């Protein structure tokens, strides 16, 4: 009954009319069109929002993006790499080698020790963040000495906990240019570097330029460097820019560049060197006189060195062959007596000549007359003494000194011609000390004897320190240096970039 009733109810419902079906289709089409329109409006709104965001970017944002892109390109150059600079497109003619970010370990150093000495024209080696340790540095120094033409080394971005940089500046080192920038060098390392420049008994004679910029050297470390400059006469350029040096360190450096008083130990060493030099000159005079006397004797004068008994024996031996020859030779008449009687006057003349020859020579005559010695015989004893004298003369303690107030003053270090102290903490007090030094060197330069080969400071960089650029002392210093500097100064960003060198 229930099923039949449901069927009857469904049959009783009316079926939808065609008009209703058409209305329903139109409504669905309108909804579809409306949905498509809404989607299109949403897309256009999104496009407008993107355009608005692009238009809202300022030129500063675009500039920042350009700078970031430039930095990426710049530092991609410092990615781990090995670069080689060759000459005339010849792979065997390598001039410079650059190692950046490449960790040098013991195995790598062994490979370099076999490769680099074979490059006869290698002049420069640049190492940047290569991870050299204190244990490997002596091996690196030995490798550098095995490269005969290598004169330039840059070891930068490579701090050493035990401060072993001084091992690159030993007495046997052949480096002329050494750059140690950005190595966290402090006062302890500066002390060892100053001692490598010079001590009382030793001095580095090969290093010409030293770069210690972008480190942590304070007034104490600057004092150690100044102590090394007292008796060093080879260093021409020193850069201490971008450090922590103040007036105390500047005064120590200025003191070395001006005439300074010797300490007690230095005075004692100077007296010993002067005594040694005077004794050496006395020995050379006596040796020259004795050598000239010996070399001025003729060849037959060697008989005079023998005792009198041996002299007679030698003369008799010389006579006996002549007598035998005279007896054995037949005379014109065939009789030996005639020949002997005829040869008798000749024997007397020969005896007189030998007697004259055996007489001791006049010492006055031997000084003026005689055989001239050969160049080898004359040079061999004197060249060693001359070399010794030149080596002693190179010692700064033997420079012409001035005595006043019971002290001995040396003229100061005038070989240093370039000093860079930019970006430190020097005030007008240190500036006035350098101004006094430059004025005194300018006065000494007017004297021909003092200016020979020793010009003094030609360039002094003190920019970006703790004094105004318009102060009177700085203006005077710049005017004096402008007259002395042989190279025109750079301007703008080029000058600021050059200050770090």
Image (cartoon, rainbow, N blue to C red):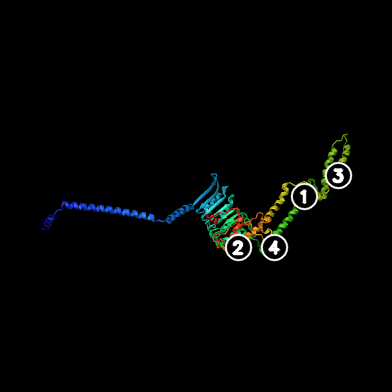
- Give the Cα separation between the discs numbered 3 and 2: 87 Å
Point out residue 70 in the picture as x, y percentages from the top left corner.
46, 53
Q: Nearer the viewer, mark 1 or mark 4?
A: 4
Crowd rating for badge 4 (residues with CA inside 10 Å; few <14, some 14–19, many 20+): few
Kindly indicate whether the residue at mark 4 contacts the one at mark 1 (C-beta within 8 angstroms): no
- Give the Cα separation between the discs numbered 4 and 2: 26 Å
User: Where is mark 1, residue-wise?
Assistant: 294
Point out residue 400 in the picture as x, y percentages from the top left corner.
69, 58
Q: Quadrant of residue 4?
A: bottom left
Point out residue 439 in the picture as x, y percentages from the top left corner.
63, 59
Find residue 432 and name its label.
2
- Give the Cα separation between the discs numbered 3 and 1: 25 Å
Q: Report the quarter where the C terminus lies.
A: bottom right
User: Where is mark 3, residue-wise?
Assistant: 352
Q: Nearer the viewer, mark 4 or mark 3?
A: 4
The answer to whether one can see residue 235 in this image is no
Crowd rating for badge 3 (residues with CA inside 10 Å; few <14, some 14–19, many 20+): few
Q: Nearer the viewer, mark 3 or mark 2?
A: 2
The mark that comes first in sequence, 4 or 2, is 4
Q: Assign a secondary structure to mark 3.
A: helix
Q: Which residue: 17% across, 52% down?
A: 19
Residue 374 falls left or right of residue 416: right
The mark that comes first in sequence, 2 or 1, is 1
Front one among 487 and 414: 487
The mark that comes first in sequence, 1 or 4, is 1
Find residue 403 and name its label.
4
């Amino acid at each position: 009954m229930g099923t039949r009733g449901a069927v009857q109810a469904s049959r009783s419902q009316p079926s939808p009319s065609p008009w209703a079906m058409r209305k329903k289709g139109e409504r669905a089409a309108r909804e579809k069109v409306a949905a498509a329109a809404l989607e299109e409006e949403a897309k256009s709104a999104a496009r407008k929002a993107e355009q608005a965001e692009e238009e809202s970017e300022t030129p500063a944002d675009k500039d920042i993006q350009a700078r970031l892109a430039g930095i990426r390109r710049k530092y991609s150059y410092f990615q781990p790499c090995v670069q080689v600079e060759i000459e005339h497109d010849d792979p065997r003619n390598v001039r410079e080698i650059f190692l950046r970010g490449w960790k040098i370990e013991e195995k790598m150093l062994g490979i370099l020790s076999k490769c680099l000495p074979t490059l006869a024209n290698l002049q420069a080696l640049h190492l940047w963040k290569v991870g050299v340790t204190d244990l490997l540095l002596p091996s690196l120094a030995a490798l550098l000495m095995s490269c005969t033409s290598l004169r330039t080394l840059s070891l930068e971005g490579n701090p050493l906990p035990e401060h072993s940089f001084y091992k690159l500046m030993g007495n046997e080192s052949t480096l002329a240019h050494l750059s140690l920038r950005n190595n966290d060098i402090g006062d302890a390392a500066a002390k060892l570097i100053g001692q490598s420049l010079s001590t009382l008994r030793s001095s580095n004679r090969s290093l010409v330029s030293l770069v210690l910029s972008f480190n942590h050297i304070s007034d104490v470390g600057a004092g150690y460097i100044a102590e090394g400059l007292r008796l060093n006469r080879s260093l021409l350029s020193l850069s201490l820019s971008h450090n922590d040096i103040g007036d105390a360190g500047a005064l120590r450096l200025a003191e070395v560049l001006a005439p300074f008083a010797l300490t007690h130990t230095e005075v004692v060493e100077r007296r010993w060197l002067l005594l040694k030099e005077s004794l050496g000159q006395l020995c050379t005079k006596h040796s020259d006189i004795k050598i000239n006397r010996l070399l001025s004797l003729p060849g037959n004068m060697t008989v005079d060195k023998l005792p009198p008994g041996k002299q007679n024996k030698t003369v008799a031996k010389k006579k006996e062959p002549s007598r035998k020859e005279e007896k054995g030779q037949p005379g014109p008449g065939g009789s030996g007596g005639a020949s002997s009687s005829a040869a008798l006057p000749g024997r007397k003349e020969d005896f007189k000549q030998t007697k004259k020859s055996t007489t001791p020579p006049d010492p006055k005559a031997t000084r003026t007359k005689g055989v001239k010695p050969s160049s080898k015989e004359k040079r061999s004893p004197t060249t060693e003494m001359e070399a010794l004298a030149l080596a002693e003369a190179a010692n700064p303690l033997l420079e012409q000194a001035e005595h006043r107030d019971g002290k001995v003053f040396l003229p100061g270090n005038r070989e240093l011609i370039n000093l860079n102290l930019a970006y430190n903490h020097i005030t007008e007090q240190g500036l006035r000390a350098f101004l006094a030094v430059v004025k005194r060197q300018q006065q000494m330069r007017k004297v021909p004897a003092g200016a020979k080969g020793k010009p003094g400071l030609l360039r002094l960089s003190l920019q970006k320190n703790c004094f105004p650029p318009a102060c009177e002392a700085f203006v005077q210093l710049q005017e004096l240096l402008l007259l002395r500097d042989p190279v025109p100064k750079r301007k703008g960003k080029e000058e600021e970039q050059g200050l770090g060198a």
